[in-house]
Amino acid sequence: MDDPNPLNGFEEQLRQAFLRRPAPPGLKRRIMNQRAQRRTAQMRNRVVLWQRIAAAFVLAAAIGGGFTWHYIDEQRKGEAAREQVLTALRITNHALDQIQARLAARDRDDHE
Amino acid sequence: MARDWQPDFERLVDEHQSMVFSLAWRMTGDRGLAEEIAQDVFLELDRNMTRIVSPEHALFWLRRVAMHRAADAMRRRRVRGVDLWIEIEENHGAPSEERSSPLGARVEQLLTTLPEPQRAALILRYQEDLTPEEIADTLDSPLSTVKSNLQRGLKLLRAKAESHLKDYLRPERSIGGALPDG
């Protein structure tokens, strides 16, 4: 009854010794818990990321709006100043016209 | 065809937790570390679920990642100077249903004395019943290296078993014979 190939006997014993061990009780539960925790953390991180993106947009819009408002305000002030200068020039021009008319009238009187 | 298969994570854990845990335990010899590795492997599977295309692919992927993670863990432990095998004889306080037979425990203990590549090849050959070609695929090693590791590992294990396990081995299954070629 001797085994013609002693290695086969040894290999068979190795197979017997190397049967899979049962997983420890609770391993699956721990894996599923960790998976759930990881997914919750991922979801939270995603929400935080979107919040940050939204906050960045709001901040960018506020800064952009501020700059735009400042630019429009400056333009409005410039227009007003230009209008004031033009009005002053018109008044001055009108006053000079009147003075010139009076001087012309006086010159005519002197010649006559 | 393969894409029709929808991976069910919970079912994959049910089906393969024993395999992953056993590979990690036999590679590291540390029950607690093997549990950590098994958890990490399945969480990594969860992250890569979209890439898994079939049940066979899932099994191959799990074996491959389990072996690599176990090797990484052993490397880290070696760097920290921890003796991985110090507790193997006490079975790490495992519940009685998890303990292997006395012969199994002794063989596992002897296995721990083998170099890591030989141990990995023998575990995949005799626990998972893989062919040398499948082992080479799993370990990313050349086939000739795997065959050499199997042959040398088996020879070394036999020699150690001869001197240490005389009480356990059946007389008619004497392991004193010569190792066949190939």
Image (spheres, rainbow, N blue to C red):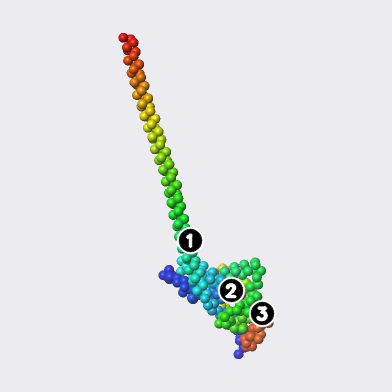
The subunit carrying tag 3 is B
The residue tagged 1 is A45
Both marks 1 and 3 on one chain: no
Point out the frontmost of discs 1 and 2. Answer: 1
The amino acid type, in three-letter code, at marker 3 is: Lys
Question: At numbered mark 2, what does the secondary structure look like: helix, strand or loop?
Answer: helix
As displayed, is residue B71 above or below residue B169? above
Residue that mark 2 sits on: B32
Report the disc number at residue B160.
Answer: 3
| Disc 2 chain ID | B
On the image, which quarter does residue B175 sit in?
Answer: bottom right
Q: Nearer the viewer, mark 2 or mark 3?
A: 2
Point out residue B42 in the picture as x, y percentages from the top left corner: 51, 70
Amino acid carrying label 1: it is: Asn
- Residue B56 appearing in the image: no
Q: Chain of mark 1?
A: A
Camera-side mark, 1 or 3: 1
Q: Crowding near pointer 1: few (<14 within 10 Å), some, many (20+)?
A: few
- Is residue B33 something one can see in this rendering? yes
Q: Is residue B41 above or below residue B163?
A: above
What amino acid type should be assigned to the residue bearing mark 2?
Gly
Residue toward you, B141 or A100 = A100
